[in-house]
Image: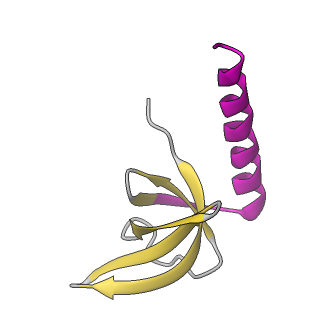
Amino acid sequence: MCLGIPGEVMEVREEDGVRFGKVRFGGVARDVCLECVPDVAVGEFVLVHVGFALSRIDAAEAARTYAVLLELAGADEGLS
């Protein structure tokens, strides 16, 4: 099973012919390869797995996914 995390594209650039971007996940920004979503723009949301943006998603879907991830993190506390 793989886990895709939604993030907001903050910057788009090209390095050696490959599209990269700075993507924000909550309060943390990371470099992400954007080659699989070549027409994504700053301000849009992408689903990221191991440093690669796999697809574009809308802001509402990103918010729903964050809510589920937060819920899962809280559920883990009850297992201790």
Residue 45 x, y percent position in the rendering: 62, 66
Tell which of 40 and 71 is nearer to you: 71
Q: Among all residues in the image, which is located at the extreme left?
A: 16
- Residue displayed at 71% across by 39% down: 70
Please name the colour scheme applied to the rendered image: secondary structure
- Using residue 71 as the reference point, say whether residue 36 is left or right of it: left
Q: Is residue 78 magenta?
A: yes
- Using residue 1 as the reference point, say whether residue 67 is left or right of it: right
* For residue 39, above or below residue 30: below
| Quadrant of image for the C terminus | top right
Span shown in magenta: 54-80
Q: Based on the displayed image, in which of its 4 quarters is residue 63 positioned? A: bottom right
Residue 28 x, y percent position in the rendering: 56, 63
Residue 17 x, y percent position in the rendering: 24, 84
Residue 62 x, y percent position in the rendering: 69, 55
Q: Based on the displayed image, in which of its 4 quarters is residue 42 positioned? A: bottom right
Tell which of 47 and 37 is nearer to you: 47
